[in-house]
Amino acid sequence: MFKFIDQTGFEIKLEAPPQRIVSLVPSQTELLADLGLQDSIVGITKYCIYPPELFLSVPRIGGTKSVNHELVSQLKPDLIIANKEENNRDSIEQLREQFPVWLSDVSNLHEALDMIYNIGVMTNSQERASEINNQIYDKFNSLTLKNKKHVAKRALYFIWRNPYMCAGGDTFINDMMNKAGFDNLMYYHKRYPELTEKRISELNPEVILLSSEPYPFKAKHIQEFKSICPKAEILLVDGEFFAWYGSRMIKAADYFYQLCDSNSNVSE
């Protein structure tokens, strides 16, 4: 019997490396595949779109916040991978009555690396997990060194419209904003605060980042924000690179590197 502690301090017990895994988080589903565990994944959510071949071949058990418990039971998983923010607490507690549920809680780069390594240990793929972590660490270290030569721009990162909602300072998005060279004006607020047009104007951001998820901001929304903050630079950004905390972070660092090149003021 092997014991593991998840990122919320909850202990789970596994008799052997899991052979039947249900993943309730898109970024962690992609991570499992990149760890070489495709054949062990027996259930995913409708939002777990990467890798595409997995999405097309593995049973879907609902959404991240609307898990079909009956379908999960039919799949007989020996491990469920979930996340504190993305999945409902009541749902997780119900699943724990039947199955081992390892819950991640990620709000920064360090915690993301910890999550990747621990999933690697649980699934007997720690060597591959370490390789992924080394790639992420090296790329973000290079990005940090690059951004030291730039002045961070004051920014707001919008995840929703009607009402307008931004990423606060205790989110993973906030940490990625910092890594990408932005100073989050909502740093002193928790989670995803709502903002009025008046408040957005008062904050006077230099840059407004419009995410592709969960609200799918498009080019048509740029003028809407221009009318609120005429002097701000409005950017449509790929939300997966700011919010996904698995192996996609390797690609995220490259994305932020390009973003930094085109949108930072050199201070030297």
Image: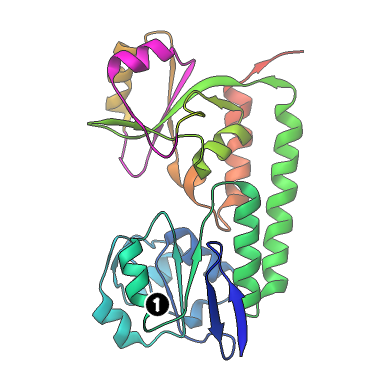
Residue placed most toward the observer, 130 or 237: 130
Q: Position of residue 132 (x, y in %)?
A: 67, 61
Residue placed most toward the observer, 187 or 144: 187
Q: Position of residue 176 (x, y in %)?
A: 57, 39
Residue 196: name its quadrant: top left
- As for residue 205 lying within the magenta part, the answer is yes
Q: Is residue 170 visible?
A: yes
Residue at the extreme left: 162
Q: Which residues are magenta?
A: 190-217
List the residue tagged with mark 1. Answer: 96
Image quarter (top left, top right, bottom left or bottom right) of the N terminus: bottom right
Residue ID at (47%, 27%): 186
Q: Is residue 77 left or right of residue 177?
A: left
- As for residue 204 lying within the magenta part, the answer is yes
Residue placed most toward the observer, 12 or 137: 12
In the image, residue 17 sits, relative to residue 220, either above or below, namely below
Q: Position of residue 61 (x, y in %)?
A: 29, 73
